[in-house]
Image: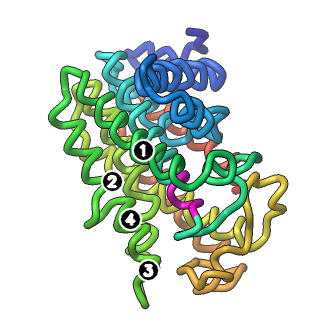
């Protein structure tokens, strides 16, 4: 792995380049999809599984998972890779389901037709299901399966996880903070915590950091939904207003939303766990903020 040396007092910590980190994520993703779509699976389902995962978007969640693992010493790279792949598989599943006619009815995702448009609704439903199953299979293969499965399940669940986030969209009212927490921050929180768990470190400080990063991401996404060019974004925009969804822009106005996301970004910086990997994490969050247009 290509690295740039980072010197800290009494510590030498190799910091992966962005390309190296992205390459590690993609290698983990290809391995997990090969296991999900092994020979013997229905051919159309195999094709659709790969279509749903590749090419990926920013891969921010699995990158966060690996950054946390690296910052904690990366004592078990195989477990960290499995955790990173699991987080991204769960995220991809949520996108497949989110795009379906019963939810957003979106035609495009990541600059190409949504899975339900390319393969039909029945196959899209099964693709999402298969990706969820494979996410748990990936962490189930690791030595720290118990803690990783529990963390992933909470991030996926109906109380504080992405299922709750999707379900809140069918309720007559929801607090914006609770919606953002469930819909997006839950999986970022899990990503950071799972990276620490995979490295044998205390996940609690990383939960707070991941939650803070997820809130930044969702607020920035709300702003993009109100202002971005759909061709540049790779998906439809204006869905929050069209479907009456909770949005920081609808709550605070555009200027207020931008001020809020700047405050959230500062909070994310403040939440970075202290330790030998702190500068590594700061480097990653700067790239994260640049990608989000912050």
- Asked whether 97 or 65 is in front, the reply is 97
User: Which residue range is magenta in the image?
Assistant: 95-100
Q: What residue is pinned by disc 3?
A: 170
First in sequence: mark 3 vs mark 1: 1
User: Which residue is tagged 1?
Assistant: 90
Q: Position of residue 20 (x, y in %)?
A: 60, 18
Where residue 130 sits: x, y (%)? 40, 40
Q: Residue at x 63, y 32 (%)?
A: 54
* First-in-chain label (4 vs 1): 1
The residue labelled by disc 4 is 182
Q: Which mark is residue 156?
A: 2
- Residue 100, quarter of the rendered image: bottom right
Query: Marks 2 and 1: in contact by CB < 8 Å?
Result: yes
Against 89, residue 34 (above or below) is above
Mark 4 and mark 1 residues within 8 Å of each other at the beta carbon: no
Using the image as rendered, state which of residue 200 and residue 29 is in the foreground.
29
């Amino acid at each position: 792995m290509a690295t740039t040396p980072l010197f800290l007092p009494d510590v030498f910590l190799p910091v992966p380049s962005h390309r190296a980190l992205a390459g590690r994520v993609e290698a983990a993703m290809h391995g997990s999809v090969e296991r999900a779509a092994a020979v013997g699976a229905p051919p159309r389902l195999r094709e659709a599984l790969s279509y749903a995962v590749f090419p990926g978007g920013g891969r921010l969640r699995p990158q966060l998972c690996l950054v946390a693992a690296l910052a904690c010493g990366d004592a078990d790279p195989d477990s960290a890779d499995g955790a990173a792949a699991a987080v991204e598989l769960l995220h991809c599943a949520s996108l497949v389901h989110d795009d379906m006619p019963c939810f957003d009815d979106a035609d495009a995702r990541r600059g190409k037709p949504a899975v339900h448009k390319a393969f039909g609704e029945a196959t899209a439903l099964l693709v999402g299901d298969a990706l969820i199953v494979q996410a748990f299979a990936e962490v189930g293969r690791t030595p720290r399966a118990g803690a990783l499965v529990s963390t992933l399940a909470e991030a996926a669940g109906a109380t504080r996880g992405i299922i709750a986030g999707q379900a809140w969209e069918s309720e007559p009212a929801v607090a914006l903070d609770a919606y953002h927490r469930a819909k997006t921050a839950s999986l970022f929180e899990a990503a950071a915590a799972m990276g620490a768990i995979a490295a044998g470190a205390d996940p609690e400080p990383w939960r707070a950091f991941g939650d803070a990063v997820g809130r930044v991401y969702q607020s920035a996404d709300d702003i993009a939904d109100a202002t971005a060019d759909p061709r540049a974004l790779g998906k439809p925009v204006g869905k929050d207003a069209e479907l009456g969804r909770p949005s920081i822009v609808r709550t605070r106005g555009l200027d207020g939303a931008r001020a809020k996301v700047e405050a959230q970004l500062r909070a994310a910086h403040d939440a970075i766990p202290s330790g030998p990997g702190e500068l590594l994490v700061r480097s990653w969050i700067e790239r994260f903020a640049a990608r989000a247009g912050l």
